[in-house]
Amino acid sequence: MKNFDILIINKGIAGLALACGLKNYFRIAIIEHKLKTHINPVSKLLNVKTSVLINITSAKILSYLNTWNKNTTYPYNIISKLEITQNYNTKKIIFNSGHLGYPELGYISDYNHIYNSLIKEAQKSQNIFFINTKIPNTINYYKDAALIEIKNYPIFKVKLVIGSDGINSWTRKNANFPLIFKDKKYYEFHTTIYTEKQHKNTLRYISHDNSLLILLPLNHTNLSAVFWLLPTNIGIKYFFKNISKEHINSDLTKICAMLGHCYIYNDIPSYKIFLPRIQYAYKFVQSRLILIGNAAYTISPFPFQDINIELIEAITLLNYLKKLKKNNKDIGHYTYLKDYEYHKKYQIFKYFTKLSNIFPLSQRNNYISLYTQNFMFNIIQTIPSLKTNILNQIMGLDVMPTWLL
């Protein structure tokens, strides 16, 4: 029998970040069957499939974990400006870097590069043991420990199991935690476009005819990743009908007029359109078990934002477990995990609140919604504190732990 403090069943960023942050405090076993993600060695172009928005708080977390600095070898692009634009550029809110004392507003980077950097950092530690398999055979939870059976390995005895194994979490299913689903009344469209004019490192949110289009500036000056929330009538047209690339290029050019002619970039697979779904586990904490990341919930409609949610969740749990260790408490006992559970429920509530505030920016389907949108744009421009609050949320400063400052 092998004894560890923590077993992390992992499939993503959150579990690896947690392990890297706890390596000096606990003995950790990680079930991780993919010890390296494939990266095209020829091209260092960021693309829509793996591009992520790293906000200021996430950059600080990665720096704390020794996986991020200005001299990092993996590709990233600095965001120096943010524009929120209303229909056909009629109204615009601009945020420049330096507004809150930071030289950048954030970064666009590649998920796979960050994933590999965390793997490398974890592999340096003698307190972290990797198990190259997909899932355990069984996990049995007892009052004082969890026992894990894995093929070709001795039985593992741990104080706490962390389920960080993604949307289709085996850990969640094994614990019989039911899921709650919430379908959204919009479609999501992803692609990478080449624009006539350079993006100038500007992150753009464009409200257009009941849709919201987000452009992430990639490290090629004329390439942007497109994340487009489409109302049902337009989404159905793109989803069920054989719409030509030329037609889509024409639609994108109208919306992104400030960047000149736009077309879907040929070197990257065409585009993806789907119905997004929000899901969250009815419970995500019990004695000897915690679910984190997408295993617990998927909330953001924008996949490029998921990494920020996962990193702040990992750093919050990391700090909580370190405090329990310092006070000689049992890290897996539900009595000591209740406070973390309450905190996490509050964070989910905040995420839903932020999400509900996004969509009024795109709604123009009647006079009331049009008036509401115009009012929102005007009041944000008029009241400096509102502008600062929006920027705080985009940069992640509203959730930054004080000890990271």
Image: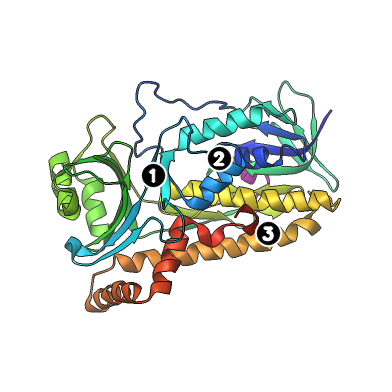
Q: Is residue 145 magenta?
A: no
Main SS category, magenta section: helix
Between disc 3 and disc 1, the foreground one is 1
> Which residue lies under the disc numbered 1?
78
Residue 234 in view, yes or no: yes
Task: Identify the residue under disc 3.
Answer: 341
Residue to which mark 2 is pinned: 13
Amino acid type, label 3: Glu
How packed mark 3 is, by other alpha carbons closer than 10 Å (few <14, some 14-19, many 20 or more), is some
At mark 3, the secondary structure is: helix
- Residue 173 highlighted magenta (yes or no): yes
Regarding residue 134, the answer to whether it shows in the image is no
- Residue 294, placed above or below residue 134: below
- Percent position (x, y) of residue 196? 16, 42
Give amino acid for label 2: Ile
**Is 262 situated above or below 349?**
above
Span of residues in magenta:
171-176
